[in-house]
Amino acid sequence: MNAAGFRKVPVVLVVDDSPDNQLILEELLKPLYDVRVAGNGQEALILAARTPRPDLILLDVVMPGMSGFDVCRQLKSRAETRDIPVIFLTTLDATDDETRGLVLGAVDYINKPVNPPVVLVRVANHIRLKAAADFLRDKNAYLEDEVARRTAEVRAVQDVTVHALASLAETRDNETGNHIRRTQNYVKALAEHLKDHPRFAAVLDEPSRRLLYQSAPLHDIGKVGIPDGILLKPGRLTPEEYEIVKTHTTLGRDAIQRAEDQLGVDVPFLRFAKEMAYSHQERWNGGGYPEGKAGDDIPVSARLMAVADVYDALISPRVYKKGMPHEQALAFIVEKRGIDFDPDIVDAFVELQDEFQAIARQFTDDPHAGAPRVTESTA
């Protein structure tokens, strides 16, 4: 139905170089259809592409210049006309000719001289089939669009939820400013750079990179469980206080796990969130915490975050220190290559250092918000 409530009249394109045949078919079809007429192949291609496009084409095979076979071949090669059913009209009766037409994409053959009742029945049948195919195609396209829209909505809700939780954690330690934004984008840059690396390609496919970016802000979510007296203490921490701060890795992992358990399903992006929250303080040589994991036993997501997190801590000013210049932070991380950090990730960081600096500038902390500080060692 169109907007006015009337059923659309199907369009039939008749292609024949004989005026007599054109007249016969036009008179036969016009009581039921909107009929267009073309006298040669080139004209047929022009009319077939015109909106509204034909619902069916009756195509003469033997024509001067461009044959019906050539016209059909071109129709089927073009996206805008490939789905229009073609019925050949021909005096040819050899099986090879019929087979050739069907192979080219025709849906039927009608021999000349035409039998009017046969023409009407076959035209009606194929227009009904096309209408059904169009309906299914439109419905599938609608469903695909709807799935894409709903998926985008779910991702948006996830992103908002993640950033709300991460921002809540940062309010407990509000002098770290845009730390979660910077580290999130550092991790994204590293993952994109390493996606084809033999050591990382299997775990850094496109969906995984998207989930890494989405979940990275939760790496410090465990801070919400650290007492204010320790978390908000200016200056360096005592060894005993530092041990308490170290528990934020386990607190963060367990909080995310409890939320997942309550959902009763595995949530892919929460796997990366748990990995980063729990293991981003592990070190390549086994000297980190909470488990002292080493090398490839440390999840890739946590190894990426380790470089991102330490770099940001080094360049950010704290109440008891100035932020390091980029060159000094770079030298520190390179010095710790193969000690604290995965060597290949450090190499990627070196190659991406200009991008890291650009990210740091883009998400710089508000200079009027006060000097940032740190609550744990960056070494």
Image (tube, helix red, strand yellow):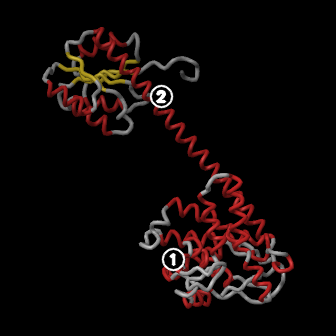
**The label number, if any, that marks residue 135 in the structure image:** 2
Three-letter amino acid code at disc 1?
Asp
Q: Secondary structure at mark 2?
A: helix
254 versus 44 height, above or below: below
Three-letter amino acid code at disc 2?
Phe
For residue 234, which quarter of the picture?
bottom right
Q: Secondary structure at mark 1?
A: helix
> Considering the image in quadrants, where does the N terminus appear?
top right
Residue at (69%, 56%) from the top-left corner? 261
Using the image as rendered, state which of residue 18 and residue 72 is in the foreground.
Answer: 72
**The label number, if any, that marks residue 235 in the structure image:** none
93 versus 78 height, above or below: above
> Considering the image in quadrants, where does the C terminus appear?
bottom right
Q: Percent position (x, y) of residue 177?
A: 75, 74
In three-dimensional space, the C-alpha distance between marks 1 and 2, rounded to whole angstroms, equals: 53 Å
Residue 118 falls left or right of residue 172: left
Residue 185 falls left or right of residue 29: right
Using the image as rendered, state which of residue 40 and residue 227 is in the foreground.
Answer: 227
Residue 42 falls left or right of residue 51: left
Q: Percent position (x, y) of residue 169?
A: 77, 68
